[in-house]
Image: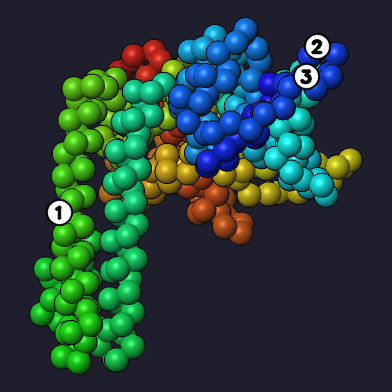
Amino acid sequence: MGLDVGDRFSQLCVVDQDGVVIQEDRIPTTRVALRERLAGPPARVVLEAGTHAGWMSRELTALGHEVLVANSRKLRWLYHNEHKTDRVDATYLARVGRWDPTLLAPIRVRSAGADGALRLVRARASLVRARTRLINHVRGAVKSVGGQLPPCDATSFARRVAAHLPAELHAALEPLLAQIAGLTQTIARYDRLVEHLAAQVYPETARLRQVAGVGALTALAFVLTVDDPRRFGDGRAVGAYFGLCPRRADSGAHRPQLGITKCGDGLVRQLLVQAAHYILGPFGPDCRLRRWGLELARRGGKNAKKRAIIAVARKLAALLYSLWVHDTRYAP
């Protein structure tokens, strides 16, 4: 079965073992409709990664089907079709699933529990982004009239800059400071929830927090995103999973140096990079990982510091995975 998923309706195509289309249908994208229409004999169901992929995969698996969630990055042939329709997409997915499923680079779907907890982490990240945009707007507005605000972090921004707003901007910016203060309080509540989840529900995060620069948020996001540590053969694959490995476009003797792939979860990748900044920064404690990163940065060359940050983040991902799997004490 190939399932082209939409927000309201999904297009279904069923092919037999000879590749002949034996059924086409348009079904509502709801749990009830899936259970009613697809409650037949077990089959291989192929759908694209997307907003609905998680819950649909779990529903179809519960019905006894083999579910493959196709990696959208590997389906460019689907998007570049000059006669693209929902029916054509569903047919393509069904035929590739019948022929060679490895071409779909199937994605592993997280468990319902991990997915629900990760929503909390993502909600916090959304609030942090909103607060950052408001702070940048306030600073930019003050600069535009020749003013200057004192340096401060995001948590104390609303309190410290209130007395430094130019008189002509009070009416425009004071409501924004109130919103920033409210967001800061809400983010603090999320932080307490993250600490509770890490300590009570996911105690394995304590193993990861042995590393300097890795707090409850980074450890929890890492554990929730990986979900099952047995899915990887070794720690090196974890760096690639979070998009921290360089892209490759080799052709003959030509091997250009490219940026990282940025595949996988962007939030965890951002948190790993932030931890790498701390490890290599002025407050990072002495350890082998820091020494290795600083030596990499000292080699010089264009963007040496940036490359060192990414390299440390990649090694940090492998280190966290190793601490989790082997339940060992970290020796810096």
> Please, what secondary structure does the residue beneath circle 1 have?
helix
Q: Residues within 10 Å of mark 1 (few under 14, many from 20)?
A: few
Looking at marks 2 and 3 on the same chain, the residue that comes earlier in the sequence is marked by 2
* Residue at x-position 75% and y-position 40%: 78
* Residue at x-position 58% and y-position 31%: 27
Check the image and report above or below for 322 versus 253.
above
Please state if 182 lies on the left or on the right of 40 as rendered: left
Residue 212 % position (x, y): 29, 36
* Amino acid type indicated by mark 1: Gln
Looking at marks 3 and 1 on the same chain, the residue that comes earlier in the sequence is marked by 3
> Please, what secondary structure does the residue beneath circle 3 have?
strand
Name the disc covering residue 185, or none: 1
Q: Nearer the viewer, mark 3 or mark 1?
A: 3
Q: Residue at label 3?
A: 22
Q: Residues within 10 Å of mark 3 (few under 14, many from 20)?
A: few
Quadrant showing the N terminus? top right
Check the image and report above or below for 164 versus 209.
below
Quarter of the image where one finds residue 213: top left
Q: Residue at label 2?
A: 17
Residue 290 % position (x, y): 40, 40
* Amino acid type indicated by mark 3: Ile
